[in-house]
Image (spheres, grey):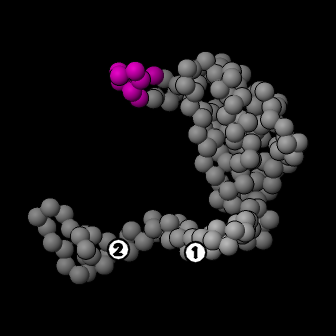
Amino acid sequence: MNWGRAPGVLLGGGATLLLSFLWMPALLPVASRLLLLPRALLSMASGSPPSQPPLASGSGYVPGSVSAAFVTCPNEKVAKEIARAVVEKRLAACVNLIPQITSIYEWKGKIEEDSEVLMMIKTQSSLVPALTEFVRSVHPYEVAEVIALPVEQGNPPYLHWVHQVTESVSGSGTALP
């Protein structure tokens, strides 16, 4: 195994052991998901639907049922308009605006650098498709950035509040324009 080996340097057993302990915390989330893999494969093989993920210890929160979505906007005016609209439509419980970020990206074969406003949107994971469609319909960019990450854990009362505020949309079963 080449862990702990840099070009031209061979580390002894103690250093290799130390490096493996330093990497262990980073590998724990991956290892915990791998432990769930046999159960998921078994349910797929049996034809039965996969079971819901376990509730977080005593909170009643289902890990991943809330997401943090990120959207970049060209300026604060556009970001505030979109933020207010998604909260009013109950597609989000809360939107934080983070001003003056710098984005460097390739667009149409050219490296670009722009000052933007980052929106951090908290919503139910089940609402991310409707949120994405709404943002795409009102956003001035040709290709709007809308990415979402599931929230595995957090403050249970806050996560419950996100569900409460957005419940009427997710419970209706209809997509919003």
Q: Position of residue 148 (x, y in %)?
A: 61, 43
| Quarter of the figure with residue 151 | bottom right
Q: Amino acid at mark 1?
A: Pro
| Quarter of the figure with residue 72 | top right
- 46 above or below 81? below
- Quarter holding the C terminus? top right
Residue 38, numbered circle: 1
Q: Residue at x 14, y 61 (%)?
A: 7
- 63 above or below 119? below
Residue situated in front as seen by the camera: 121 or 32: 32
- 169 above or below 45? above
The alpha-carbon separation of the residues under discs 2 and 1 comes to 26 Å
Magenta residues (range): 105-114
Q: Residue at x 73, y 65 (%)?
A: 49
Residue 20, numbered circle: 2
Q: Amino acid at mark 2?
A: Ser
Q: Residue at x 25, y 74 (%)?
A: 1
Q: Position of residue 66 (x, y in %)?
A: 71, 51
Q: Position of residue 173 (x, y in %)?
A: 85, 42
SS at badge 1: helix
